[in-house]
Image (spheres, rainbow, N blue to C red):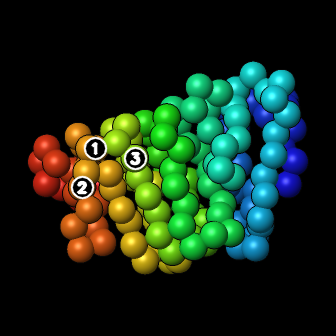
Amino acid sequence: IQLPASLSKENLSNVRFAFPECPKLKNITISEDSPYCSIKNNCLLSKNGKKLFFAISCDKTLKIPSRVRTIKCGALALCTSETIYIGKKVSNLETGALSNDYIKSIIISKDNKHYKSYKNYVLNKKDKSMG
């Protein structure tokens, strides 16, 4: 899927709704001229790479790009990876960010200061709530 360079900032979080029944979606691209977003590892990101809006994966493992700090609500809804690796910089998981029937394992960097994995759950280190 080629996303238009004109994709507005306001519509970035809504891209996932455009492909609700496309679990076999294998590739997304966008023009480098896009002022608001970029693509890395089949992840639709903010231009600076700090917010993850949408991800797909054809592999068994999806590694969230290292610059990501926020994973938006529903960002992994269409991801078919069984294992998700979350790096040390992620500090904000919006409600429903990891909702997905395909995910069997979530691995969080031991250097992440905000979250940790526990029995396939994500826990907030500060208050021990589920992430």
Q: Mark 1 points at which residue?
A: 112
Marks 1 and 2: CB-CB under 8 Å? Answer: yes
**Which numbered circle lies on residue 116?**
2
- The picture places residue 73, in percent across and down from the top left corner, at 49, 50
Marks 3 and 1: CB-CB under 8 Å? Answer: yes
- The residue lying at 82 percent from left, 39 percent from top is 30
Q: Can residue 9 be seen in this view?
A: no
**Sequence-earlier tag: 2 or 3:** 3
Q: How far apart are marks 1 and 2 (CA)?
A: 7 Å
- The residue lying at 83 percent from left, 24 percent from top is 33
**Sequence-earlier tag: 3 or 1:** 3
Left/right placement of residue 108 relative to residue 29 reads: left
Q: Which of 67 and 34 is in front in this view?
A: 67
102 shown above or below 69: below
Q: What amino acid is at disc 2? A: Lys
Q: How far apart are marks 3 and 1 (CA)?
A: 7 Å
Quarter of the figure that contains the N terminus: bottom right
Q: 10 Å neighbourhood of mark 1: few (<14), some, or many (≥20)?
A: some
